[in-house]
Image (tube, helix red, strand yellow):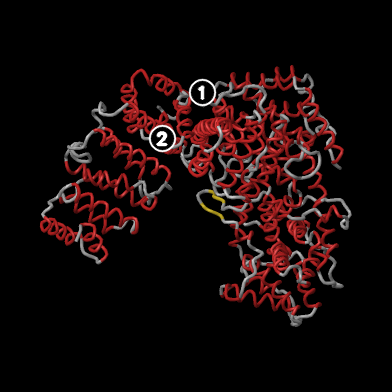
């Protein structure tokens, strides 16, 4: 029997630690092996393997503790095996790792020995010691990436162990310069990306200094660059990444389009710190001077405005871009200024940069004229307008907001537009001052239950026309929403949510200025927990709750929020409202759901029923009613089809759901009916009748129609509808006309154009990623601001397939002389962080999965094509890794969070890439060329020493 078998069998059969130790000694005597390194390693590895299956097990800890104290297991061997095993994700449990680490430390301290002789064997070479240090630094990164614990201090434990290991590095003369560069890269990565204790930082900086001295004059450029900045990142010109400082609408255009398109996500316009971090990362990646960056950003912003549509509520509309550029961007720029001031940029420097940028912008009369032309067209399409605000030139509105937040001087503003000061009072400000209020207090006093719908609409239209008031409106809404939610004040919360979902542009305003997903968290908590058991008037309470449900459904659909939302360390899942269309079989329902279903079906679809009384509402949680509503209608349609209920009973049941009491359940009901209609290939007359009766009823809420009309049109389009059997109660053209009217499509519902509205939706949807890339390249060629909705592309196609598609399009574009555009687009796709729960990080996918196949394909190409594509790959790799490095640093410093927003650190990606390229360089000419070009770039190697040749 071997030591691993003995240890496993002893543990699994409940043998005590003392008995196991005795058996181990007996086995050692029988095999005449004594206690040596192989035995120690076998025992340590076996126990660590068991820990993967039994995390933090106390018996295993006693096995280890006893074997360490007895000498059967050497502490140096245990430290070595434990540090290597810690890389395994299956062992990465905070309590387990902390316990193992503390055990190694305790064994060392109780031994009374110095680190060499305790955690490091006296016979270990310095190369082995440095390898152990490298393992410890890798463990340190893992410790920072694991969730924090109130009971375990893993980071402190591994920091203490790392200090002891570093003290064992006494002679580095045995290692080569190339090895020293690798160790230096690891140490610098830890120094610059993790929050370290002062003791560990001091020891690690000494280690870095020793490595730098060892490398001598050949590494002077690396050393000097690393001393220049707090983060020790090069900010100079980049040779392989050469930056074009002329007008560049691609880089900042993609940045701004991304902030707006992803405004409800972690790295969108609604999240100040994350948005600022991405802007700082972009500034450092491009190596632009502040005045150049500001100019590029402002030109790109106004280019986005000039490209927008004067009508429509989609994301390209003028209203949304005016709200962002005038109402939100100045505040993001102010936050950017404050963050840069913390890293060496003075307020005077930043203001000088903003002044230079505005002066350059004023020379772009063509661009300013285009913005004003779109604004004029938008005024002509709006029924209500503020003659003072909406008719100002766009640049004047923008300057006024820059002045209001304090990032330009009054004197400079007057040189740009002498009337800017006299024309700075808005209509809302005037009204507020007349009542003796600040604007915020004035808005708060108007958004009340006492205000009529007409007065509320008039107020919201005024807010819409004045982007400078948008942040105040968002503050008022957020404070009220939070307060009402905590107090469970459904009456006021119902009024607020109804106001918001009735006026769609109000949601857009909120999405630009706050994390609207946090409001959803409060709403989801109420919806999932609320019951009417002790409520005085359950019918009114349920109606109020219904407005909160409709608001939540509207926000989830409008902003395509489907992933879990994390707020304050708690995860909120959206399935409750995204899965309301599910129809359950009887055996899938819990006893509580079964009872509720039977009670409600009898109350609604039984001709002898007296209707819905308070007792039913008190005994059924609204959440359960929401979950069974689709099943109620599915069973009612089946019962009508089988003749078990008559038409009048079905219509009476539907009438309950068209009233305030239950209409908040209709979105799930209609989608369930549509799914059944599609499943039956449109041969579902009663399901169609239910859809028509609900959607075409004057009592159906507009928000329900808006949420359901797109799905209706996708299903009821084209020639398929001709196969629907004739039915006096059913007219599909009426359903379609209602949907078109709801969506604002003003055409004759019978014309062919409308029949083509959603023909072949699957084909169009699957082709979306290619079309998105084509349109982005076309916009870039015409010097406009491109946009690539990466998150949406990834809902259509897998990440690797999307990246292969992107490469094929960029390869063609680069052959036409558009290398710079290709670099910037690829960098945006790969290196700009997105919400990880919505889109997987693409940088590791590209480097690990896609790049090897691209290199293999390039190896087989002709010389000319091979040279062009190899250069494109070098450009993309160097650009994306450098951008990722700057962005991850910016996220860590601005957001004060230790997280890998791109899946892995850029240093880790670079290390693996360098290893892979070196492994393939003898068999792959392309790999060898890429490795040589990256290694010959001083700027790139400064940031990624692992590529030193």
Q: Is residue 195 above or below residue 595?
A: above
The numbered dot on residue 633 is: none
Instruction: Label 1, secondary structure: give it.
Output: loop
Q: Residue 71 in the image: x percent, y percent?
A: 15, 49
> 10 Å neighbourhood of mark 2: few (<14), some, or many (≥20)?
few
- Badge 1 is on which residue? 235
Looking at this view, is 457 or 265 the one in front? 265
Q: How many marks?
A: 2
Real-space Cα distance between discs 1 and 2?
34 Å
Q: Is residue 280 visible?
A: no
Looking at this view, is 611 or 888 the one in front? 888
Asked whether disc 1 touches disc 2, contact meaning CB atoms under 8 Å apart, the reply is no
Q: Is residue 107 visible?
A: yes
Residue 320 located left or right of residue 620: right
Q: Residue at x 23, y 59 (%)?
A: 7
Q: Quadrant of the N terminus?
A: bottom left
Q: Quadrant of the C terminus?
A: top left
> 10 Å neighbourhood of mark 1: few (<14), some, or many (≥20)?
some
- Badge 2 is on which residue? 922
Q: Residue 815 in the image: x percent, y percent?
A: 63, 31
Looking at this view, is 943 or 930 the one in front? 930
Q: Earlier in the sequence, mark 1 or mark 2?
A: 1
Q: Residue 519 in the image: x percent, y percent?
A: 62, 50
Quadrant for residue 632, please give it.
bottom right
Instruction: Label 2, secondary structure: give it.
Output: loop
Q: Residue 435 in the image: x percent, y percent?
A: 77, 37
């Amino acid at each position: 029997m071997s030591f691993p078998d003995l240890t496993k069998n002893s543990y699994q059969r409940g043998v005590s630690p003392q008995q196991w130790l005795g058996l181990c000694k007996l086995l050692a005597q029988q095999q005449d092996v004594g206690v040596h390194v192989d035995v120690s390693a076998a025992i340590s590895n076996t126990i660590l393997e068991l820990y993967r299956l039994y995390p933090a097990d106390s018996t295993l800890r006693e096995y280890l503790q006893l074997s360490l104290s007895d000498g059967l297991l050497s502490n140096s061997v245990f430290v070595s095996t434990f540090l290597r095993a810690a890389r395994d994700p299956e062992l990465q449990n905070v309590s387990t790792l902390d316990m193992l680490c503390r055990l190694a430390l305790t064994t060392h301290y109780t031994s009374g020995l110095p680190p060499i002789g305790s955690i490091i064997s006296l016979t270990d070479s310095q190369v082995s010691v440095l390898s152990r240090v490298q393992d410890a630094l890798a463990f340190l990164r893992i410790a920072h990436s694991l969730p924090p614990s109130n009971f375990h201090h893993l980071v402190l434990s591994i920091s203490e162990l790392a200090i002891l290991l570093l003290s064992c590095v006494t002679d580095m003369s045995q290692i080569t310069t190339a090895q020293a560069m690798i160790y230096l890269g690891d140490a610098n990565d830890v120094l610059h990306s993790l929050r370290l204790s002062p003791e560990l930082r001091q020891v690690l900086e000494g280690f870095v200094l020793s490595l730098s001295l060892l490398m001598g004059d050949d590494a002077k450029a690396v050393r000097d660059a690393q001393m220049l900045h707090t983060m020790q990142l090069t900010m100079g010109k980049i040779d392989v990444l050469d930056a074009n400082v002329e007008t560049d609408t691609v880089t900042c255009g993609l940045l701004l389009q991304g902030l707006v398109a992803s405004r409800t996500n972690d790295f969108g316009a609604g999240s100040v710190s994350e948005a600022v971090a991405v802007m700082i990362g972009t500034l450092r990646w491009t190596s632009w001077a502040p005045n150049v960056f500001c100019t590029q950003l402002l030109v790109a912003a106004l280019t986005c405005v000039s490209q927008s549509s004067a009508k429509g509520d989609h994301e390209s509309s003028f209203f949304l871009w005016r709200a962002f550029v005038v109402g939100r961007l100045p505040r993001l720029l102010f936050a950017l200024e404050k963050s840069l001031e913390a890293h060496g940029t003075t307020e005077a420097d930043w203001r000088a940069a903003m002044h230079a940028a505005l002066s350059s912008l004023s020379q772009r009369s063509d661009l300013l004229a285009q913005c004003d032309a779109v604004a004029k067209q938008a005024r002509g399409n709006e029924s209500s307008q503020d003659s003072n605000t909406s008719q100002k030139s766009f640049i004047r509105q923008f300057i006024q907001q820059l002045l209001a937040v304090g990032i330009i001087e009054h004197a400079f503003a007057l040189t740009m537009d002498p009337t800017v000061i006299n024309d700075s009072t808005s209509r809302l400000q005037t009204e507020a001052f007349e009542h003796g209020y600040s604007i915020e207090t004035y808005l708060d006093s108007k958004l009340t239950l006492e205000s009529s719908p007409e007065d509320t609409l008039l107020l919201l239209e005024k807010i819409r026309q004045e982007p400078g008031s948008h942040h105040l409106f968002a503050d008022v809404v957020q404070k009220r929403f939070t307060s009402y939610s905590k107090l469970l004040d459904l009456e006021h919360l119902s009024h607020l949510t109804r106001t918001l979902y009735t006026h769609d542009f109000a949601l857009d305003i909120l999405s630009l200025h706050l994390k609207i997903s946090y409001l959803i968290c409060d709403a989801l908590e109420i919806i999932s927990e609320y019951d009417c058991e002790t409520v005085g008037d359950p019918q009114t309470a349920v109606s109020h709750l219904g407005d909160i449900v409709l608001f939540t459904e509207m926000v989830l659909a409008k902003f395509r929020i489907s992933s879990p939302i994390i707020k304050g360390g708690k995860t909120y899942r959206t399935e409750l409202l995204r899965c309301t269309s599910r129809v359950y079989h009887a055996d899938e329902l819990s006893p509580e759901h079964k009872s509720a279903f039977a009670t409600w079906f009898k109350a609604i679809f039984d001709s002898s029923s007296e209707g819905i009384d308070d007792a039913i509402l008190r005994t059924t949680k609204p959440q359960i009613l929401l979950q069974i509503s689709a099943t109620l209608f599915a069973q009612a349609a089946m019962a009508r089809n089988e003749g078990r209920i008559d038409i009048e009973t079905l219509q009476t049941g539907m009438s309950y759901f068209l009233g305030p009491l239950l209409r908040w359940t209709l979105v799930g009901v209609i989608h369930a009916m549509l799914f059944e209609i599609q499943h039956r290939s449109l041969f579902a007359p009663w399901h169609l009748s239910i859809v028509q009766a609900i959607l075409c009823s004057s009592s159906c809420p507009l928000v329900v129609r808006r949420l359901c009309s797109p799905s209706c049109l996708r299903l009821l389009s084209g020639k398929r509808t001709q196969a629907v059997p004739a039915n006096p109660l059913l007219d599909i053209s009426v359903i379609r006309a209602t949907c078109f009217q709801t969506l604002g499509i003003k055409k004759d519902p019978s014309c062919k154009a409308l029949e083509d509205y959603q023909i072949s939706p699957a084909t169009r949807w699957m082709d979306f990623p290619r079309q998105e890339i084509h349109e982005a390249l076309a916009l870039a060629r015409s010097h406009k601001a491109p946009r690539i909705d990466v998150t949406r592309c990834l809902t259509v196609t897998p990440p690797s397939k999307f990246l292969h598609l992107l490469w094929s399009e960029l390869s063609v574009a680069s052959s036409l002389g558009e290398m710079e555009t290709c670099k910037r687009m690829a960098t945006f796709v790969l290196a700009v962080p997105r919400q990880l729960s919505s889109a997987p990080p693409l940088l590791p996918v590209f480097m690990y999965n896609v790049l090897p196949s691209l290199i293999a394909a390039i190896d087989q190409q002709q010389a000319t094509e091979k040279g062009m594509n190899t250069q494109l790959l070098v450009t993309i790799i160097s650009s994306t890794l450098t951008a990722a490095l700057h962005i991850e640093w910016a996220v860590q410093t601005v957001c004060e969070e230790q997280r890998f927003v791109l899946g892995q650190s850029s240093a880790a990606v670079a290390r693996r890439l360098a290893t892979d390229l070196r492994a393939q360089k003898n068999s792959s000419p392309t790999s060898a060329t890429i490795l040589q070009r990256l290694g010959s770039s001083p700027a790139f190697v400064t940031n990624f020493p692992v590529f030193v040749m």
